[in-house]
Image: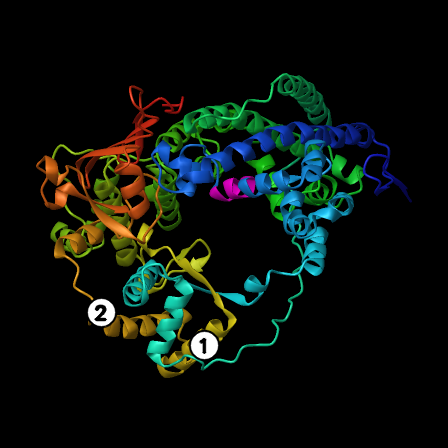
Amino acid sequence: MSCRNTVTGRRKKTLPKSVAWVAADYIAPKIAKALLSIRPAEARIVRREAALLAYLKEGQRYQQAGLGTPAAFALETLQMSPSTMKERVALDRTLRECPLAEEAFLEGRLTVCKINVLGPALRAAPEKATEWIERARKKSVRALRRLVKEEVSEAPERAAETMISFQAPPSVHLAFDAVLELGRKQIGHNVPRCEVIEALLFETGFSGAGEVPEEEDSRPVPKRAEVVLHGSPKPPSEAMARVVKTLEELDEHLKQIDTIAASDSPSSTFEAIDQLDRLLPLERSLRIFQARLLRDLRATRAVYVLGFRSVSDFVENHLGVSERTARNMVADAELFEDVPSLTEAYVRRDISLGKAHRVRWLTNGRDVDAHCRRAAEVTHRQFDREYRFQTHLRQCFPILASRFRGPLPQTGLDAALMHDLRKEGLTGEDVEIELIMRDIEPIKEGCSLDPAENPVVMCRLEALLDLLVAAHWADPPEVEERLVPRDRQTFGLDRTPVYIRIRVPRGVAADWRAAIKATQEQLGLFTPEWKAAVVLFAHVYEEWSRVDPESEPTQKKILKRDRFQCQAPACPKRSNLEAHHLKRRSKGGSNKVSNLLTLCHGDHQHVVHAGYAKVSGEAPQALRWELGCRPSKEPLLKRLGERIVGGSRAPATR
């Protein structure tokens, strides 16, 4: 037998009326209503955030904070993922173009996920906004996405294009960038990348060799995997008491948000950042309340009373979010469970959500405060690098890792790795020769031994672990559920596989596939796509470089030392790289290697030379950064390498 739930409208199972199930039947509607009550308050905050982020991205105002890309600004200044910032900017555009959608969003009838899915439909037919909003309110995000795709035709210029995408080592990505730059020198500096690919295919003789398919087959949507909360539920009485306390705290918090008046439009970049500093903790606290309520929903077994199969099923269908957002909300419920120090660091915006997940995995409930402090004071790029190093150390050498459980830097770790290498038969001279072959210079006397402050220390630790794995394991070790080939046993940042993606016309894509297939037939049946691409790159590079002047040897040496990556804090760019003089030549600076630093064009010309950031010291082991420089005011952040050492926005956990 079953009956219909009055809150969700779903049929629920009739269960034995034990004390636990009576309590769950009582508390389930309260949790469901509380989660819905969060939506209007969250919408007000998100709407204001979206407007501020769009203001900062317009005209590249974010560069005044000392960061050259929107991704770096989102990660380091706001502790927000770049994808979230991109979604917020898209949300602002849709709501500005459709006031009816903005009204429905602020009232809580539509979620961020549904607004972003509706964007193309609302822009294509503004007169049907009321109809689309009503249809969106009744459908899940997945069903709404299919409906929009069916009824809104794709733009002709986008429909005539497709994506070339394949996975490759970073060295191949660098070769791809080099071919693009060389190709632009041949046919024009401002041409799009797709025209360079077309010229590449013409040079190799594959232009017009492919057949354009009439229509790509639509693949069925894969069946969704159920996501459930793990762990043993709390006793019913304890869980009920916790639910009552959470609901009381939520009511008080919503009253505080209601008293916050809407801020005026910002007059400067730094005023917009200040307003975001006040809004983001409020949004994060609401996210914590959602996580706690979802945790209580599982602990009290109320999700079954509401008629849903799992917590993720409830979140996706009752709260109206996408499948990915539902998974993230369920993961948050586990992430912040019974770890108050991690929760406080997240709400204070000392760490991002990505850093919080890494801290939880590294600590397993121990030394949380120390790892939170480390995560707060280093960049995302550096913390991700340290996380991968410690992860691989634990997986390959758990006994050695048990001696160094805390965050980096760890006193004696370098010596311990050297000791184990000697046990495997390698002498100190052998190790030094290997380090020289990897272009890792010796650590200078008096320089910092913190991997975040001195990149040479981090490179040395990664290389020592790489050598220890190669010397210890007779067979390829299994790392993160995949086998590492014998000739690729390395855990350094440079060996992480990347994707090469480029949007090209469908005819060019067909020619590319034909070229790759023909090259694979020459090299062997099981040749990966990236190896075939390297053969094509090498051919055109040899042809085009005959008329290309050779680069200066000094600049080549600098790029190689800095691993062909922009050295500005948090910048991930590996293309359009330039050499920057730490001390300008007009002020007596030289062309010595220690006075040159690799920067991307954006950071070099629009941030450092514009005066928004200052860098001094000697490269690469003693660099000091000042980000967000303002006249007669303290910079936003002061960094020694990749570690924060001061500034007006330095985290409170320091």
Residue type marked 1: Asp
Residue 47, position as x, y percentages in the image: 60, 32
Residue 145, position as x, y percentages in the image: 68, 53
**Tag shown at residue 545:** 2
Seen at 36% across and 83% down, the residue is 522
Could you tell me which secondary element the residue under label 2 belongs to? loop
Q: Is residue 165 above or below residue 296?
A: below
332 and 206: which is toward the camera: 206
Query: Of helix, strand and loop, which mostly describes the magenta segment?
Result: helix
Q: Which residues are magenta?
A: 82-88
Q: Which residue is mark 1?
A: 511
Q: Is residue 221 above or below residue 446?
A: below
**Crowdedness near tag 1: few (<14), some (14–19) or many (≥20) residues, C-alpha within 10 Å:** many
State yes or no: residue 118 in magenta.
no
Residue type marked 2: Ser
Q: Is residue 150 above or below residue 618?
A: below
Residue 254, position as x, y percentages in the image: 66, 21
